[in-house]
Amino acid sequence: MTELAKLYGESLYDLAAEEALEVRILEELDGAAACIKAEPDYLRLLSTPSVPKEERCGLLDEAFGGGVHPYVVNFLKLLCREGALRELPGCASAYRKRYNKAHGILEVTAVSAVALPAEKQAKLREKLAAMTGKTIDLTVKVDPSVLGGLRLDLDGTRLDGTVRRRLDAIRTDIGSAVL
């Protein structure tokens, strides 16, 4: 995420928090980012300097005007006018980070070789919540290459208890052993 995206996303969060619109703006911002990501040609059109800025902003009004809060539409138009619409995913990410921090939410990604049953996900969520004192937003991914165990990515930290990591550690130890 760039500094510009961080600045814009956090500023939008501050505005939304003042108006008690944090959740709505978060959902609509994520939706707008997903729509624009799904249509790369639309993003290219909105970033084309030969199309006047007011015309590009009009296209954003047509696409999002009636369906999302005016703050989101105006934010998209601001990014378009500044030639920074490609920063939208980073802005949405910065907004979400501020939202999570303000609401005591910790995003955790759990990676395992097989799908985790719902009861194990619930236990993991409970244990992490007890350890951190935060509400856990858990995303579970399956990656057969980990072979077994569990890898957790949370708040910039990786806790790796996978079989793959252990095998790699043994391989390193054996490779560095003096015979």
Image (cartoon, rainbow, N blue to C red):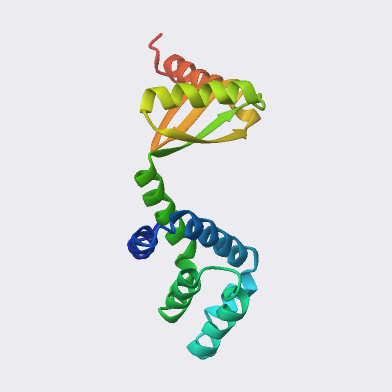
> What residue appears at the point 44 percent right and 74 percent down from the top-left corner?
79
Q: What is the total number of numbered labels drawn onto the structure image?
A: 0
Give the residue at the far front of this rendering.
Answer: 20
Q: Position of residue 161 (x, y in %)?
A: 49, 21
> What residue appears at the point 54 percent right and 61 percent down from the top-left corner?
28
> What residue appears at the point 59 percent right and 73 percent down from the top-left corner?
64
Left or right: residue 44 compared with residue 129? right
> What residue appears at the point 58 percent right and 60 percent down from the top-left corner?
31
**Image position of 84 with respect to 177: above or below:** below
Q: Position of residue 117 (x, y in %)?
A: 66, 24
Residue 107 visible in the picture: yes
Q: Position of residue 56 (x, y in %)?
A: 54, 84
Q: Position of residue 24 (x, y in %)?
A: 50, 58
Residue 164 visible in the picture: no
- The quadrant of the image that shows the C terminus is top left
- The quadrant of the image that shows the N terminus is bottom left
**Image position of 112 with respect to 27: above or below:** above
Left or right: residue 26 compared with residue 112? left
Q: Quadrant of residue 37?
A: bottom right
**Image position of 124 with respect to 16: above or below:** above
Front one among 72 and 153: 72
Front one among 137 and 159: 137
Front one among 50 and 13: 13
Q: Quadrant of residue 146?
A: top right
